[in-house]
Amino acid sequence: MQHNSILLLSYWYPNKSNKNFGIFVKRHAKAIKECNKVVVLSVNVIKGTTIFKQYVDVFIDENGVETHQIYLESTYHKLLYVFLPFQYTIIKNYVLKNLQPIYHFNFIHSNVIFPCGIIGYKLSKKLNCKHIITEHWTRIDKFFKKSAYSFIAKKALNNAYAITCVSETLKQTVQKYTNNSRFYIIPNVIDGSQFFYDSSISKNKKLTFIAVASWMPHKNPFYFLDALQELFKTKKINEFKVIIVGKGGQIDQMKKANYGYEIEYTGGLNSDEIRTLLNKSHIFLHGSDYETFSVIIAEALLCGTPSVVSPYGIATEVINISNGFVTNNTPKDWQEKILKCTQSSYDNKAISEQLKHKYDSKIIGNLFAEVYK
């Protein structure tokens, strides 16, 4: 039974330019639809060939979610992205004309405080409905220290009906900037039909470490690459290879480091290819200086791959003695934890079972339903 009518507002959402951009928000939309009526309004401020062009794309997606995508194109797109009064006028007029008369929304549900949470806050006041903010952003601290919009952003947080964060780590970060006590932890959705342990896939004959990420800050592959170099040099681990999956500016830095062991760079891969490599590999490694969630950690575990990871996002919630180690991000600890992991015996199937259904769409949908109630 659908209890509420929700406008899910996001500036991070798959669009015509990038089919995977903000895919985690789209998965939340699908989850919310399990128990409530949801309409998505995504705003896309992108580079164009004229001073300004505006158009809208409306469709029902493969999950049955009605989706409205407003495109704001401009040669001055970076300036436009921070011109919130102009954006608000466009969004408000579109909602008042095309959506609110039909759906009579109970909630505006914004994703990420800037610019979406600020726009959503003003829109909720205009529509006289409750406002929820879901936070995913790794750059919260930087925003509140430097942005001219930090004052109105704090106002949006303080007045939100509820604030949801994808991990305890992120919750602790956001709490520094608001007196609002209505916080909920609601994780990202992870598709267990895409990531799972496949007993028909044999492990590589050579000990294989794998890392998967978009290789940009705050990711830090050098934690584990440097640790492996030391273990290799001291002959504590002899024969092994490392697979680096993904694209990003740090790839060139990794190559320039000229490590003494074998590294294979695959570039970007799809879910099926990543699942196969995770099943073939022996140990998953994830180095980072900050994470809000880190979906890939859960995906690796669902594939039954023991993991050694940095202490952020969901790391301490899902990693335990039976499936790997959480490091303290020092060189010594990375070396010790990787070495211990190579010397331990693991039940890959048992590892995969630990998180089964924990992040399913229906489970996450029920968590959101409780917040709306």
Image: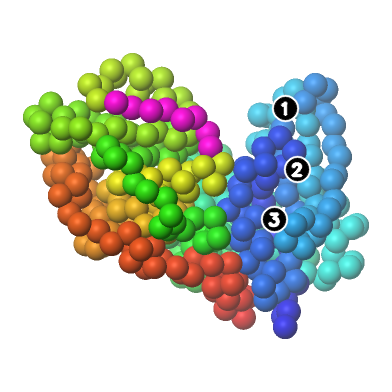
Q: Nearer the viewer, residue 301 or 43?
A: 301
> Foreground residue, 82 or 265?
265
Magenta stretch: dominant secondary structure: strand
Picture quadrant where residue 155 is located: bottom right
Instruction: Name the amino acid, label 2.
Output: Gln
Marks 1 and 3, the one that precedes in the sequence: 3
Q: Are marks 1 and 3 in contact (CB under 8 Å)?
A: no
Looking at the picture, the colour scheme in use is rainbow
Q: Residue at x 62, y 42 (%)?
A: 21
Q: Which residue is mark 3?
A: 9
Residue 8 sits in quarter: bottom right
Q: Where residue 322 appears, x then y in whole percent?
A: 24, 63
Residue that carries the numbered disc 2 in the rendered image? 87
- Rendered-image quadrant of the N terminus: bottom right
Disc 1 versus disc 3: distance between alpha carbons? 21 Å
Give me the residue at 58% from left, 76% from top: 366
Decide which of 235, 109 is in the foreground and name it.
Answer: 235
Q: Are marks 2 and 1 in contact (CB under 8 Å)?
A: no
The residue wearing badge 1 is: 47
Q: Residue at x 85, y 51 (%)?
A: 58
Q: Position of residue 368 (x, y in %)?
A: 58, 71
Q: What type is the residue that disc 3 sits on?
A: Leu
Chain-order first, disc 3 or disc 2: 3
Q: Which mark is residue 23?
A: none
